Amino acid sequence: MVEKIQWDDRYAIGIERIDAQHRKIIGLINRLVDLSGVTTDSTLIEDTLNEMTIYATEHLDDEERLLERCGYPHLDEHAAAHKEFRKCTALLCYSVVEGRVVVPEEILTFLCHWWSAHILHDDMAYRDHVTTGCGVAAEGLASDGSGSPRR
């Protein structure tokens, strides 16, 4: 059985908006973990996976806009990791609809591993650049939802 992701300080990037988005994504993944006994044809699984996919896409787009505005030198590699996540998630969602995946074990393993590794490695790699070099403080980003750093 897949264990829930327990949010703690090691996952905190130090950018409130990004951390809040990460917490929500982890919460949605943990909701899927709670549904681990539910069959693949469950609308509850499908709806939760769909909600997580839509929200994750919004978060990844938001994060990429932030990194672009901050001139993050490794944006292309970071965006490529996001693209691979989107591709894998789309294939998993399609497989669920087609009833071809054992849900949620295969999906949960992928989601838990990918998000944990991505936050702890890829996102931590941009933290210093964004918080010191770009002037984004711990209180977050512009409240207009643009992903723009506060100046």
Image (cartoon, helix red, strand yellow):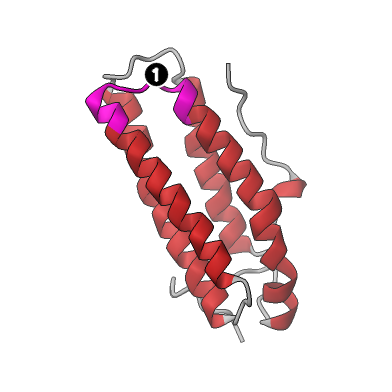
Q: Is residue 147 above or below residue 151?
A: above
The answer to whether residue 141 is seen in the rendering is no
Residue at position x 68%, y 67% in the image: 126
Which residue is more in the foreground, 118 or 54?
A: 118
Region of the chain picked out in magenta, as a range: 95-107
64 within the magenta span: no
Which sits in the foreground, 35 or 75? 75
Residue type, numbered disc 1: Val
Query: In what quadrant of the picture does the C terminus appear?
Result: bottom right
Could you say which quadrant of the image residue 47 lies in?
top left
Q: Quadrant of the N terminus?
A: top right
Count of all numbered marks drawn on residues in the image: 1
The front one of 82 and 131 is 82
Residue sitting at x 67%, y 40%: 7
Image coordinates of residue 132 in percent, x first then y, are 75, 78
Q: Quadrant of residue 44?
A: top left
Identify the residue at the far left of this view: 98
Left or right: residue 22 compared with residue 96: right
Residue at (57% x, 65% y) in the render: 77
The residue closer to the viewer here, 32 or 78, is: 78
- Left or right side of 58 for 151: right
Residue 96 counted in the magenta span: yes
Residue 105 in the figure: left or right of residue 67 = left
Q: Check disc 1 and report the residue beneath it.
A: 102
Coordinates of residue 121 in the picture (x, y in percent):
70, 53
